[in-house]
Image (cartoon, helix red, strand yellow):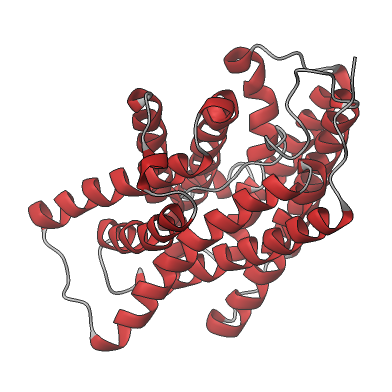
Amino acid sequence: MTVALAPSRSSVSAGIGFACLGFALYTCMDTAVKWLSAGYPLYQVIFFNAAFGLVPMLAYAQLTGGFGQLKTRRSWLHGVRAALALIGSFTCFHAYSVMPIADVYAILFCAPLLITALSVPILGESVGWRRWSAVGVGFIGVMVMLRPGAGMANPAILGALFSAVANALGFLLLRRFIATENRITFGFYASAATAIATGLMILVFGGVMPALNDLLPIAIGGMLGGSAYLFVTNAYRQAPAAVVAPFQYTQMIWGVLSGYLLWQDVPDTTMLIGCAIVIASGLYILHRETVRQAPVAQGATPAGTVASAASPIKTT
């Protein structure tokens, strides 16, 4: 048995840098979505985001080997992921439109718990009692945030939770097939299909002509989302998932900051307590995943090639 070589210090540093930048850009995109949702139909906002998100992806594909790398033999796979991305976009973007960004993030952070739980029936993985315990504790945190009897009546909160489920399912498919599919295809086909579907909705149901002062946030928001996907996927390419994944939680910092500066939103104590429980559970699951997979045996996937089950890559 041989052990995979650990990534160099410079590679890990680059991965951390890519992760911090990528997750910060995701928050910029989400802020643009919330800003635009007040004046445009939701399907039109999703169209803007997906269509402009294709620009950096196409540019990256051209610069790193040409458009040929976007070819795939698994159209069904990308069709399923595109459907999950479309549904997740509607539920998540609706939540952004009526809730503080930080509150939506707190609920979305339960995705690693869902990934761990769903990896048993979908991937056939074995989950030990420690990780099951962490999942259970994490869902207690989710219930604290949902406030049964009060929050459960809020469709936006349920939408954010459903978006976390869609994100988890999409990531499990990515994890299952990433070894034989170019990583960029997952983001490209999801965005392309979403743009086509919502573009047809605009033709059928009508849209709103963008105001001149909205054109810049429309374009920048979408391109930042596409760029964020590229930065985060490259972060996992440069550094082990155990190093990269925790930086996803920095989105809470940026979400609180943008929400306060633009809308004077401040998360309440109950939401913060629930979020802290979920984050702690996710980090423990990541720790157990890292312990379980080390050392990497010959024939296994080297560290950093596939994100761990506790670190979903956002594609919506």
Q: Residue furthest left?
A: 204
Residue in the picture at 26% in, 69% down: 40
Residue 300 quadrant = top right
Judge left or right: residue 309 versus residue 190: right
For the point 38% across and 56% down, the residue is 58
Task: List x then y, in percent, for residue 25.
Answer: 57, 67
Q: Quadrant of residue 32?
A: bottom left
Viewer-closest of 269 and 297: 297
Q: Residue furthest front?
A: 65
Residue at horizontal 15 percent and vertical 57 percent from the top? 202
- Tell which of 245 and 93 is nearer to you: 245
The percent coordinates of residue 6 (x first, y second) are 88, 40
Is residue 115 something one can see in this rendering?
yes
Location of residue 256 with respect to 304 vertically, above or below = below
The foreground one among 47 and 260 is 47
Q: Which of the image's four quarters has the N terminus?
A: top right
Q: Residue 142, how many percent across, how many down?
A: 68, 42
Judge whether residue 87 can be spotted in this image. Answer: no
Residue 279: give x, y in percent of width and height. 78, 48
Q: Identify the residue shown where x is 62% and y is 79%.
A: 260
Number of numbered discs: 0
